[in-house]
Amino acid sequence: MNKGKKWLVFVVLGIIVHFVVIFSLLLLMDRLLEVQESRKIFTDLSAWEKLEPYVTKDLDLASDRYLQDLAPTENWTKEVRYEGKTYTVFAYVFSTEKDAAEYWKRIQNREPLFGAFDYYWGAHTTWQTSNAIHGKNVYRIYGRNWFAWSAFSDFTKYATEDFPVDLAQLPRETSKS
């Protein structure tokens, strides 16, 4: 192999190593931020009113592709702009825990892990999501912001800090499913 080809192979391998290292660091950051998230949920939709000054658009129920045939009795569905980033908030009160669990199954592809409650928080390179269920109440916060883990973490903490139910403090009973 001549020097030109060796140099090209070296450059390509260097680029691949850099991508692997960067990807690994991004995954590590994702996991570190996940551990720091609060796990709170509302008991009344009025808890979302603190976000009203940041609302840029009211959303109708049809904008939530996971809702389909489910009909919440109450909802707070808005697009919110907070500190330069845009988030979509879907907060619902369903008439039954069964309907709430069905919605959860659609957004998480699984039953609630702890019976009547569960939570999920994830931040990835191009999107972020925070979901929680407790009884008949479910919320899903979704962001499509590049490399915005900290911003998403700050927003979800701000949005949920006054919520009265801390899911991390509830006893863990695994789902019977």
Image (spheres, rainbow, N blue to C red):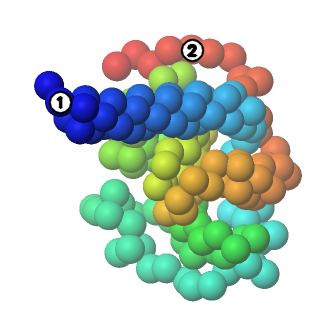
- Closer to the chain start, of discs 2 and 1, is 1
In the image, is 7 to the left or to the right of 22? left
Residue 139 on image: x %, y %: 56, 53
Which residue corresponds to the image point at 76% horizontal and 53% vertical from the top-left?
154
Q: Is residue 13 visible?
A: yes
Marks 2 and 1 sit apart, C-alpha to C-alpha, by: 65 Å
Judging depth in this view, the residue of 145 and 99 nearest the camera is 145
Q: Which residue is mark 2?
A: 173
- Amino acid type, mark 2: Glu
Residue 2 on image: x %, y %: 17, 30
Quarter of the rendering containing residue 176: top left
Quarter of the rendering containing residue 169: top right
* The C terminus lies in quadrant: top left
Quarter of the rendering containing residue 8: top left
Q: Secondary structure at mark 1?
A: loop
Which residue corresponds to the image point at 23% horizontal and 38% vertical from the top-left?
4
Q: Which residue is mark 1?
A: 2
Q: Is residue 137 visible?
A: no
Binning the other alpha carbons within 10 Å of mark 1 as few (below 14), some (14 to 19) or many (20 upward) gives: few
Residue 77 on image: x %, y %: 55, 71
Q: Quick check: 114 above or below 152?
A: above
Residue situated furthest right in the rendering: 162
Which residue corresponds to the image point at 42% horizontal and 43% vertical from the top-left?
104
Q: Secondary structure at mark 2?
A: loop
Contact (CB < 8 A) between labels 2 and 1?
no
In the image, is 75 to the left or to the right of 108? right
**Viewer-nearest of discs 2 and 1:** 1
Q: Quick check: 70 above or below 36?
A: below
Residue situated furthest bottom in the rendering: 57
- Amino acid type, mark 1: Asn
Residue 68 on image: x %, y %: 28, 62
